[in-house]
C-alpha cells in the first residue's frame, strides 16, 4: 500500500496546523463532562488521550470535531476559531472512529465520492481511486460496504476521513473491534499519512496509545490530570498515574 497523494492545503503552515485548547468546559445540566481543560499541541504532533470511563475523552473529541459546542472556552484548530468558523474548520478535520460513518448500501467508491463532492475536492474521481488504492481496496471499489468485514470497513472509513486532505486527524477508539491483521494495516496507514498532520487519539489501550504518541493527556472526571511530551515522562511513573486515575472513573 502507498500513501495517497496529498491535495494542496489552502494556506497551510506550521502555525495553522497547531491545536490550542483554552479553558474548555462542557456541561450537561449540573454536571461538567469536560472541566476547564487547556493544552497546546504543535503542528505534526500525535496526542493520545487516556482516562477512565466518564473522564470526558469522547466529549472533548466531539468538541474538537465541531460535533458539540463548548459551554465555555475556546478551540483554535489549524488557525481557525471553531466557535466563530465551524464550517471552515471542518475543511481541516478528518474524523476516524469505531463508527465508520459510511452508508452500507452504497459502494466504497460511492461513499467516498459523496464526501469528496461535499468537501469540493478537485478531481474527486481521481482522489477516490488514490485513496482506495492506499487502503488496499481499489479492487473492491464497486462492492457495497455492507458486504465488507469490520477491518475492511474501517479501511474505507480511513479513506473517508482523508478525502479532504485534513491537517488535523481525530481518532476515537479506532482499534475497537479490529482483529490483529486489521490493526497492523491500520498502523501502516496511519504511519503513511502522519507527515505534516496533527493527530488526537482517544484510546483505552495504553500500550498502543503510547507507541503512537509524542504527547500524552490524561483526563479524570473531566479535568486534566497530566499533559506532557512523551519523551519527558518516566513511563513507570506514568503507568502508576494512569492506574490511579482509572479508579476515578464513572461506569
Image (cartoon, rainbow, N blue to C red):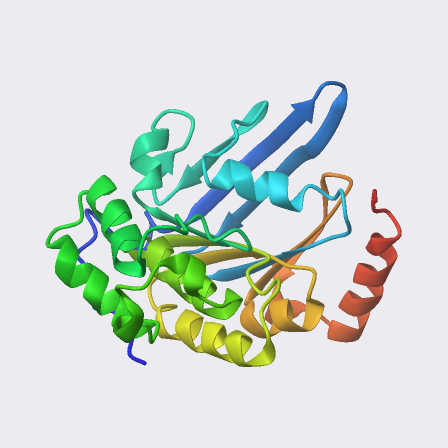
User: Do we see residue 76 in this rendering?
Assistant: yes
Q: Position of residue 235 (x, y in %)?
A: 74, 73
Q: Position of residue 46 (x, y in %)?
A: 50, 62
Q: Compared with residue 118, is residue 12 higher up or lower down, i.e. above or below? A: below
Q: Which residue is the extreme one toward the top?
A: 29
User: Do we see residue 13 in this rendering?
Assistant: no
Q: Quadrant of the C terminus?
A: top right
Q: Which of 210 and 171 lies nearest the eye of the viewer?
A: 171
Q: Is residue 220 left or right of residue 228?
A: right
Residue at the image position 31 percent from the left and 59 percent from the top? 108
Q: Is residue 15 left or right of residue 176?
A: left
Q: Compared with residue 80, is residue 106 higher up or lower down, i.e. above or below? A: below
Q: Which residue is the extreme one toward the left?
A: 123
Quarter of the view holding residue 72: top right
Q: Which of 223 and 97 lies nearest the eye of the viewer?
A: 97
Q: Position of residue 16 (x, y in %)?
A: 32, 47
Q: Position of residue 91 (x, y in %)?
A: 29, 42
Q: Which of 90 and 174 lies nearest the eye of the viewer?
A: 174
Q: Compared with residue 138, is residue 196 higher up or lower down, i.e. above or below? A: above
Residue at the image position 31 percent from the left and 57 percent from the top? 107
Q: Which of 169 and 112 lies nearest the eye of the viewer?
A: 112
Tally of numbered discs: 0
Q: Quadrant of the N terminus?
A: bottom left
Quarter of the view holding residue 120: top left
Residue at the image position 64 percent from the left and 38 percent from the top? 37
Residue at the image position 56 percent from the left and 67 percent from the top? 213
Amino acid at each position: 500500500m502507498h500513501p495517497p497523494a496529498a491535495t494542496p492545503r489552502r494556506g497551510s503552515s506550521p502555525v495553522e496546523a497547531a491545536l490550542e485548547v483554552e479553558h474548555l468546559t462542557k456541561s450537561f445540566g449540573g454536571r461538567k463532562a469536560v472541566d476547564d481543560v487547556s493544552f497546546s499541541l504543535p503542528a505534526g504532533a500525535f496526542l493520545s488521550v487516556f482516562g477512565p470511563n466518564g473522564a470526558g475523552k469522547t466529549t472533548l473529541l466531539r468538541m474538537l470535531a465541531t460535533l458539540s459546542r463548548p459551554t465555555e472556552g475556546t478551540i483554535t484548530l489549524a488557525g481557525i476559531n471553531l466557535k466563530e468558523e465551524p464550517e471552515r474548520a471542518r475543511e481541516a478535520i478528518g474524523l476516524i472512529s469505531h463508527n465508520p460513518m459510511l452508508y452500507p448500501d452504497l459502494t466504497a467508491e460511492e461513499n467516498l465520492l459523496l464526501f469528496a463532492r461535499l468537501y469540493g475536492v478537485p478531481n474527486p474521481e481521481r482522489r477516490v481511486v488514490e485513496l482506495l488504492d492506499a487502503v488496499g481496496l481499489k479492487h473492491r471499489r464497486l462492492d457495497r460496504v455492507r458486504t465488507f468485514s469490520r477491518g475492511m470497513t474501517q479501511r474505507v472509513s480511513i479513506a473517508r476521513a482523508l478525502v479532504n486532505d485534513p491537517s488535523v486527524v481525530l481518532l476515537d477508539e479506532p482499534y475497537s473491534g479490529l482483529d490483529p491483521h486489521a490493526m497492523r494495516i491500520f498502523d501502516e496507514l496511519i504511519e503513511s499519512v502522519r507527515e505534516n498532520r496533527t493527530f488526537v487519539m482517544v484510546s483505552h489501550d495504553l500500550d498502543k496509545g503510547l507507541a503512537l504518541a509524542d504527547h500524552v493527556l490524561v483526563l479524570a472526571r473531566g479535568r486534566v490530570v497530566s499533559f506532557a511530551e512523551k519523551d519527558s515522562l518516566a513511563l513507570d511513573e506514568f503507568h502508576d498515574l494512569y492506574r490511579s486515575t482509572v479508579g476515578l472513573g464513572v461506569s
